[in-house]
């Protein structure tokens, strides 16, 4: 379980991978009869059929720094990788067609390929920057789920010691929480050589649970909720502003310390999460722009509230649908618990068989996972959304001055996309990133910037006092003098 390579120029990830050697980490585990795909896997398979396997959302890229207190050589790292795959049957599972149906096929034994990348000398950052680039490079090739294990590993080695471990995980096998659990076990195996706790539920276990009567009834309740919700949604979310551009969809990012401070301040004062504050702000701007009393917003739900699901190594997250009714013109503060309750209802009905959901929508003459969804998808993917909440006293002048320091940047364009508008909340240096990806017939970059600045200004206004309806008045349409990202 070792490999040797010659030092070479590894300044770029492509060069590093080109000069890597291939090692293997043998694994063995208990027999498992396998299972159908889980509901979460089926949802992802629908997305793969829509967009192709090369879509970036279908892999999760992670990097684990080698333990600082203990030297880590290549054979030890390979043993840890082998033990990790042995421990979790999800990591030794392929998706193959059996009897005309896709199934999870679990292997009792096998070998996990591991790239070993030699570095000429220990880099100043311990190889952290290069390892992130290697992760991106390894994720660029779609997984062949019928032939390949659902993860890829690379070791960055200098002076005979492993400095960084790159892990790329297929989203068909893990969601974000499961990925963190896998990395936790890997760190324990690197340091201690073992994980004492029994393995949690695996993907095949979850699929067998979903085949039971209790979860089938839960699925039917979710289907009824979604159909009822769709009948309450407006036909359109945003007005068109012109012809679509090429590429049709554009992602733009506003980096804002003001929005970050304001959202956390409102959350602290009103005793809600900052995600609820941000979701309410986005709903308010959409309502103002669309002129509609009701707003439909999709969000991702982790589906891990039940004990047997909390640490499962499986893809459990699925879409939830919120219906937010603002017809009675509440203040911003009054709307916060309403949005929270709408989110709870969405969470309760976000665990379902997507094939059953699709069939029910088709029977009702409603679209499901077809074309471009006309409503908003909201996703808060900050790593620590509730950390470092500000105190009760806000400096109004400083907060409003921070608006002018926000920076706007046009990011990548996409030819195809699922959503007419997707809003993401992301970590950003010195603040919060508000990213919108939209159809350029509705949200070309200049309009996308105004949308994001409307959300930002609304948050600041809400932080500084009681914000009565309309939250998004004409003042929010006036552009702030923009700070442009380089």
Image (tube, rainbow, N blue to C red):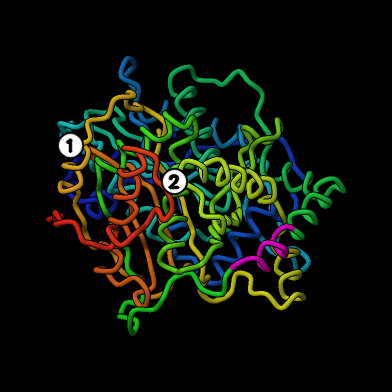
- Residue 327 against residue 27 in the figure, above or below: below
> Is residue 298 something that shows in the picture?
no
Question: Where residue 329 sits: x, y (%)?
Answer: 51, 54
Q: Nearer the viewer, residue 325 or 38?
A: 325
Magenta stretch in the rendered image: 225-233
* Residue reaching furthest to the bottom: 243
User: Which residue lies at the image location 44% right of the left edge and 55% below the top edge?
Assistant: 284
User: Which residue lies at the image location 54% right of the left edge and 20% below the top edge?
Assistant: 194
Label of residue 141 in the image: none
Label of residue 397 in the image: 1
In the image, 352: left or right of 190? right
| Quadrant assignment, res 121 | top left
Residue 26 belongs to the span the image colors magenta: no
Dot 1 crowding, Cα within 10 Å, few <14, some 14–19, many 20+: few
Quadrant of image for the C terminus: bottom left
User: Which of pointers 2 and 1 lies earlier in the amino acid sequence?
Assistant: 2
């Amino acid at each position: 379980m070792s490999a040797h390579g010659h030092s070479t120029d590894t300044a770029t990830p492509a060069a590093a991978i080109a000069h890597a050697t291939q090692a293997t980490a043998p694994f063995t585990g208990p027999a498992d009869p396998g299972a159908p795909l889980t509901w979460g896997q089926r949802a992802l398979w629908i997305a793969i059929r829509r967009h192709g396997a090369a879509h970036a959302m279908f892999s999760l890229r992670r990097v684990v720094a080698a333990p600082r207190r203990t030297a880590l050589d290549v054979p030890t790292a390979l043993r840890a990788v082998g033990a990790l795959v042995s421990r979790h049957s999800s990591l030794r599972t392929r998706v193959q067609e059996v009897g005309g149906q896709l199934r999870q096929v679990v292997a009792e034994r096998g070998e996990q390929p591991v790239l070993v990348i030699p570095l000429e000398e220990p880099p100043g950052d311990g190889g952290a920057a290069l390892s992130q680039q290697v992760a991106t490079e390894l994720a660029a090739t779609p997984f062949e789920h019928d032939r390949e294990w659902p993860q890829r590993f690379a070791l960055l080695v200098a002076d005979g010691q492993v400095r960084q471990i790159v892990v790329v995980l297929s989203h068909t096998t893990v969601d974000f929480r499961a990925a963190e659990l896998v990395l936790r076990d890997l760190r324990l195996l690197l340091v201690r050589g073992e994980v004492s706790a029994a393995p949690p539920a695996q993907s095949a276990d979850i699929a067998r649970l979903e085949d039971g009567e209790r979860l089938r009834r839960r699925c039917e309740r979710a289907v009824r909720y979604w159909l009822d919700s769709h009948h309450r949604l407006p036909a359109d979310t945003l007005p068109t502003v012109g012809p679509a551009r090429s590429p049709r969809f554009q992602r733009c990012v506003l980096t804002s310390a003001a929005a970050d401070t304001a959202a956390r301040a409102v959350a602290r004062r009103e005793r809600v999460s900052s995600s609820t504050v941000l979701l309410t702000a986005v709903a308010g701007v959409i309502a103002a722009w669309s002129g509609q009393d009701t707003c439909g917003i999709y969000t991702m739900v982790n589906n891990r509230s039940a004990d047997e699901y909390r640490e499962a190594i499986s893809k459990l997250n699925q879409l939830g649908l919120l219906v937010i009714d603002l017809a009675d013109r509440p203040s911003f503060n009054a709307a916060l618990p309403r949005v929270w309750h709408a989110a709870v209802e969405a969470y309760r009905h976000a665990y379902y068989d997507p094939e059953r959901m699709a069939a029910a929508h088709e029977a009702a003459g409603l679209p499901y996972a077809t074309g471009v969804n006309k409503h908003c998808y909201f996703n808060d993917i900050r790593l620590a959304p509730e950390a470092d909440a500000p105190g009760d006293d806000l400096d109004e002048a400083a907060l409003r001055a921070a608006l002018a320091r926000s920076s706007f940047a046009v990011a990548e364009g996409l030819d195809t996309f699922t959503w007419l508008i997707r809003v993401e909340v992301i970590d950003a240096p010195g603040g919060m990133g508000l990213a919108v990806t939209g159809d350029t017939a509705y949200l070309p970059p200049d309009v996308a910037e105004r949308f994001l600045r409307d959300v930002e200004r609304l948050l600041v206004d809400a932080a500084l006092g009681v914000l009565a309806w309309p939250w998004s008045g004409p003042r929010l349409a006036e552009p702030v003098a923009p700070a442009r990202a380089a």
